[in-house]
Amino acid sequence: QVLLLQSGPDVKKPGASVRVSCEASGYTFVDYYVHWIRQAPGQGLEWMGWLNPKSGGTNYAPKFQGRVTLTRDTAVNTAYMELHSLRFDDTAVYYCARVDGPVTIYGVVLSEGARYDMDVWGQGTTVIVSS
Amino acid sequence: DIQMTQSPSSLSAFVGDTVTITCQASQNIKNHLNWYKQKPGKAPQVVIFDASVLESGVPSRFTGSGSGTRFTFTITSLKPEDIATYFCQQYHNLPLTFGGGTRVGIK
């Protein structure tokens, strides 16, 4: 069974950092990009960035550039999202999701048979920023 | 950034009705569009990818169509288990962007 298992909820103070983990199982971890998406309470979905587990390469949404760091540990099939300088409006559910094909700043890189949807999601991690 | 304008933001229909959601992109995104379903407290799940391809295991009452800037998502013969919020998402270019969502309810 293909699964992404995320770490548990966290409460942080403004200005702190939070790290969320996303452990993959049931597939070859390095063969799929890992994307991070967040959802503030009652709001829509906001894309934060992607990580290429094979190379360690990353791409961040401009809104989060400089404040988010995506990393991975291939020995334990786990991706990490660290968000720094937390603010109250960073309170949200954070999701990881896998994507088959690459999308770059130049556009989608069409690969034979690749898919570009988020076909497997983690269960979500609630991060609350509170003083 | 590519803006995705989704409408309506919410709708209610009777069981058995056909409901349609639209998603308008701010520029031509070809067929680089996905649709997701999200139930309260749960992660989203893909329903349609590449604008019109039904995800494996998803009932055939869900269909997607469109290309360029205008897309539609249709549920025929609405069932109670279809109550959810539906989002469109473009993957034509970074940053990936989502529509604002449509909450589908039962009358």
Image (cartoon, rainbow, N blue to C red):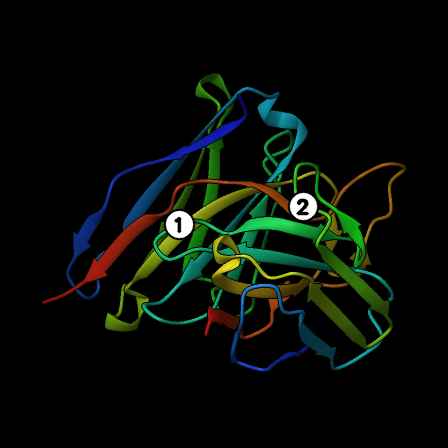
Give above or below for A100 relative to A26: below
Chain letter of mark 1 equals B
* Residue ranking furthest to the left: A131
Quadrant of the rendering where the C terminus of chain A is positioned: bottom left
**SS at circle 1:** loop
Amino acid type, residue under disc 2 in the picture = Pro
Give above or below for A58 relative to A30: below
Q: Which of B16 and B61 lies nearest the eye of the viewer?
A: B16
Residue A22: x %, y % from top left: 42, 35
Give above or below for B42 relative to B26: above
Give residue B75's mark: none
Identify residue for label 2.
Answer: B59
Identify residue for label 1.
Answer: B42
A35 displayed left or right of A101? left
Quarter of the image where one finds residue A80: top left
Q: Residue at x 40, y 50 (%)?
A: B42
Q: Residue at x 87, y 66 (%)?
A: B30
Crowdedness of circle 1 by 10 Å Cα count: few (<14), some, many (20+)? few
Give above or below for B75 relative to B4: above
